[in-house]
Amino acid sequence: SVDPVTGAADLIGTRFNAANEVVSDVLGYAGRVWICTRKAQATTCHIYSIRPGIETTWTTERTSANSRGYNSMLAVDGILYVATIAGAGFAALIEKRSAAGTWSTELTSSDTVNENYYDSLVLWAGKLYAASYHNLTASVAAETAAGYKSSDILTGPRHVQRDYLFHT
């Protein structure tokens, strides 16, 4: 926490073992503070949680696999969505955690280029949106009964490319 008068910050829990990992997002979910981590050319990153003032150590909630890091998180109606970044040869994912604690994959990128990603999850008008980068092409993806469908609508320099997907 941060003292609004002095600006002094208190350490929440003990330091976790995050060698070369960077905290990429933080949120409150299910009565806990959650953080996700990422690093360049990640081989393993994590999602941790803690109950500040009750617990003194972070709980490892999820460990990434296949050169994936965690970019951002969003909690909606008891479900935790997590966007990933993936290294060369692996696809980015949007994963979700049910209120019961079961993890599953919500969306898998069709690309496996280095550092393809989903990021910046947001809920707008009842739909889940995420920025993404996939193989130099931006598109809009809408969830249908058969899954996510994409159509290419924009190409250009990497720094301006974004996908926006929505979940109905």
Image (cartoon, grey):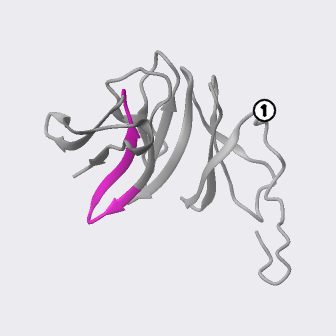
| Location of mark 1 (residue) | 19
Q: What kind of element bears circle 1? A: loop
Q: Is residue 52 above or below residue 116?
A: below
Q: Is residue 55 above or below residue 19?
A: below
Seen from the viewer's position, the closer of residues 12 and 111 is 111
Q: Residue placed at 82% from the left, 84% from the top?
A: 5
Residue 79 placed where, x, y %?
41, 52
Q: Residue placed at 62% from the left, 24% from the top?
A: 41
Q: Quick check: can you spot residue 113?
A: yes
Q: Residues within 10 Å of mark 1 (few under 14, many from 20)?
A: few
Residue 18 image-quadrant placement: top right
Amino acid of disc 1 = Ala
Q: Is residue 49 left or right of residue 149?
A: right
Q: Is residue 10 left or right of residue 70?
A: right
Q: Is residue 71 left or right of residue 129?
A: right
Q: Residue furthest top?
A: 89
Q: Residue furthest bottom?
A: 5
Residue 157 placed where, x, y %?
39, 37
Residue 68 placed where, x, y %?
54, 28
> How many marks overall?
1
Q: Residue furthest left?
A: 145
The magenta region covers 122-135
Q: Quick check: can you spot residue 80?
A: no
Q: Is residue 67 magenta?
A: no
